[in-house]
Image (cartoon, helix red, strand yellow):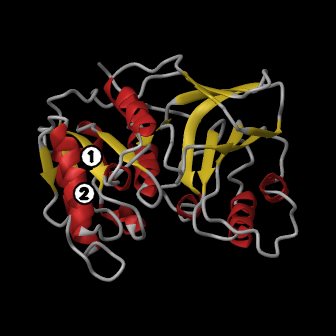
Amino acid sequence: MTRPVIRPPAVTPETGVAIVSTSSPIPADELDRVVAYFTDRGHPVTVAPHARAATGYLAGHPANRAADLMAAFADPSIGLIVPATGGKGAAQLLDLLDYDTIAVHPKVFTALSDPVVLANAITARTGLATLHGPTGFDFSRPTINQATAEAFWRIVSGPVKDVEVPGVGWRVARGSGVCLDGPVVGGHLGTIRALVGTPWMPDTTGALLILEEVFVPWVQVDVALTHLRLAGVFDRIAGLLVAVPVDSDREDAPDTSYDELILRCVGGSFPVVTNAEFGHTSTKFPLPLGMAAQLDLTSPQPVLRYLENLVTT
């Protein structure tokens, strides 16, 4: 795949942080904790004008959410944009964003769950590397997961090229003995599925595709993966990395294991690694969308290796 990559500037102790609601509403106490977290680290924090909006399961009108996100990208004092939380509705912003403006005002944009649809679209349309990593949901917890926070600050503030993530507990469902690399694409399964057939779907040719899911039974994972397979998403990927499923019940699925479910649904012969912690688990490692990473399956324990830096320093 062609990757005209733009790296955002590194986050420094003086970098301004914008908190933007892209999806569902965030409770007031959680938003206050997110603001306090970044403020306590010394960052000037801007809370987007509509960050506290709530209209049913949406954080206000899509036009307002899109305007807040665009204002954060255009603001020269902002260097890190953090979605307030996940939920539903981020895809409603895709046709409302000015991707040319985003390309000339690169910032670190971190996303997980629903907002990752924006991260993938931004990377696909502008070449700006984004981050599959913690958002306001993680930074609003009464107790912040230190491993997650440390990995986040490391990747957004400096070089990570050649840094390794040991695959403790990961399972090689297929492809043991190989070493593969490619630009990272993907995220939340249901959200990535929503991009199929749209102009914002990233090219998955040669990619290390990452997928994670939460709060859905295996039958819905089956349906989503089958859809991606039929749409050709898996046809030319370098490999597939699947996260630990969270609150995902087997129910009456015909498969005896989650790995069996994945392999049955995705088809192909590309390497598949499962049970990695990058999704809705409290402990998670970040992945730079659009940047190359390597999955080394030549040893008993898999290793993920960053091949490029997310940011410029």
In the displayed structure, would residue 114 be above or below residue 234?
Answer: below
Between discs 1 and 2, the one toward the N terminus? 2
Q: Is residue 121 left or right of residue 192?
A: left
Q: Position of residue 298 (x, y in %)?
A: 79, 21
Residue position for label 1: 81
Q: Is residue 233 visible?
A: yes
Snapshot quadrant of residue 70: bottom left
Q: Position of residue 18 (x, y in %)?
A: 20, 48
Q: Position of residue 173 (x, y in %)?
A: 82, 42
Residue position for label 2: 20
- Asked which secondary structure carries label 2, the reply is strand
Q: Is residue 66 visible?
A: no
Q: Nearer the viewer, residue 57 or 96?
A: 57
Q: What is the quadrant of the C terminus in the image? A: top left
The tag on residue 121 is none
Q: CA distance from mark 1 to mark 2?
A: 7 Å
Q: Position of residue 281 (x, y in %)?
A: 53, 51
- Asked which secondary structure carries label 1, the reply is strand
Residue at the image point whose x is 56% and y is 37% from the top: 184
Q: Is residue 262 left or right of residue 181?
A: right
Residue type at mark 2: give it.
Answer: Val
Snapshot quadrant of residue 12: top left
Residue type at mark 1: give it.
Answer: Ile
Q: Residue furthest bottom?
A: 56
